[in-house]
Amino acid sequence: MLEELEGEGHRTISSQGLAHQSGVTSAQVRKDLSYFGNFGKRGLGYGVTRLRKEIRLILGLNRRWKVALVGAGNVGSALYSYKEFRRQGFDIVGVFDVSPDRVGQRWRDLTIRHVDDLKEDAERIGMEIGVIAVPARAAQSVADRLVAAGMRGILNFAHRRIQIPTAVALRTVNLSIELESLAFAIKVLHAKPSPDGKRRRAR
Amino acid sequence: MLEELEGEGHRTISSQGLAHQSGVTSAQVRKDLSYFGNFGKRGLGYGVTRLRKEIRLILGLNRRWKVALVGAGNVGSALYSYKEFRRQGFDIVGVFDVSPDRVGQRWRDLTIRHVDDLKEDAERIGMEIGVIAVPARAAQSVADRLVAAGMRGILNFAHRRIQIPTAVALRTVNLSIELESLAFAIKVLHAKPSPDGKRRRAR
């Protein structure tokens, strides 16, 4: 949100403005931010650029991360092409698969490697984050390999829960669940009609 | 989770078992489920198949949904190939783009249509859910077209907040934010080392 505000030329924003755009109360915005530091000035609000930088620092985004992508199918290919990752500091520096059709293929400046090479590549290049974009049945074995290769965090797109040591961070993206929760929201909206025609900020 | 349990041959599961696997308390599991009905038997737990069916009914998944996909680039292509959507009841019955290179292409049993045809196609075929997989700058105009075409829900993959009427349900998937929250989790884990080597259930 702050990046968008900055791009639109805004210099400052009030806690009310942040609250309005993010769907929480202004008291919550002030409380949450004050937990990390004293970023705002009474009556002036927050400097957009400074707050953006502070939040990137808080999130650990004041650096670049080397990412290993496992799975060079449709999901993997889309993730590799997703420019926003690089813009936010995440560089996919290795792509791995098991299919003989895929291993050895060139993807821009990378050659797809066999998963058997993951550990050696990861250690040599210093990969820290692994992305799982393989079919569900292969998800746990890929997770085990990523852990063995020293990853500090894993982003799992496979439709299967995986188990990893507590010392490795994990985020799961389940695209089906997004559609399912959308279906539920439609059902709820249908049950309790809300006034139409009003525009709102997006969640 | 219930689908996995069913696939593994489990007939029943206790609230403790559900709690353990989903990372909440068993009291919360019982409380949440009792809000919708009386699904469990004291001392016997929940029937896995029955609870799965009941939850699909609660979520509005006891039917199929016709989905319009706007954006036939890398993200759109990956979503179209994602078999799990169809398995969960979501059928992509129309793909739309503006690029002359893409409009008219065959994708399996569909021909990519121009976004100008969205409204007519959506009304004729009865599309209810729109998926936005276009660059950020085009996201709002696509959202406006989807609303005008009568969509009841929108799933937004564009890296831009969109505004739609409150009567239309909205879910946003921001893949960058998943990686950012992973980076933060790694930072937090690093700050407070946790005992290594233990396995946990995934979130």
Image (cartoon, coloured by chain):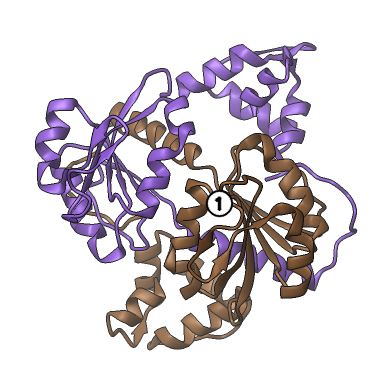
Chain colours: A brown, B purple
Identify the chain of the residue marked 1, using the numbered disc in the image: A
Q: Please give the residue where the numbered disc 1 appears in the rendered image.
A: A72
Q: x%, y% of residue A54? A: 55, 83
- At 79% from the left edge and 49% from the top edge, which residue is drawn? A144
Position of the C terminus of chain A by quadrant: bottom left
In the rendered view, tell whether residue B57 sits above or below residue A179.
above
Residue at (33% x, 27% y) in the render: B65
- Picture coordinates of residue A179, whole percent (x, y): 42, 37
Foreground pick, B185 / A196: B185
The answer, for residue A147, to whether it is visible in the render is yes
Task: Identify the residue at horizontal 20%, vertical 54% (top origin).
Answer: B101
> Is residue A47 visible in the rendered structure shown here?
no
Q: Quadrant of residue B201?
A: top right
The quadrant the N terminus of chain A occupies is bottom left
Residue A37 drawn above or below residue B122? below
Question: Mark 1 packing: few (<14 Cα in 10 Å), some, or many (20+)?
Answer: many
Count of picture labels: 1
Q: Tell me the amino acid under the disc marked 1.
A: Ala
Q: Give the SS element for disc 1.
A: loop
Where does the image place residue A115, in percent across and percent down from the top left?
A: 71, 53
Residue A53 at what x, y percent from top left?
51, 84
> Which of the 4 image quarters holds residue A66?
bottom right
- Residue A181, picture quadrant: top left
Q: Left or right: B4 with respect to B52?
A: right
- Looking at the image, is B125 positioned above or below residue B181? above
Query: Who is closer to the viewer here, A195 or B60?
Result: B60
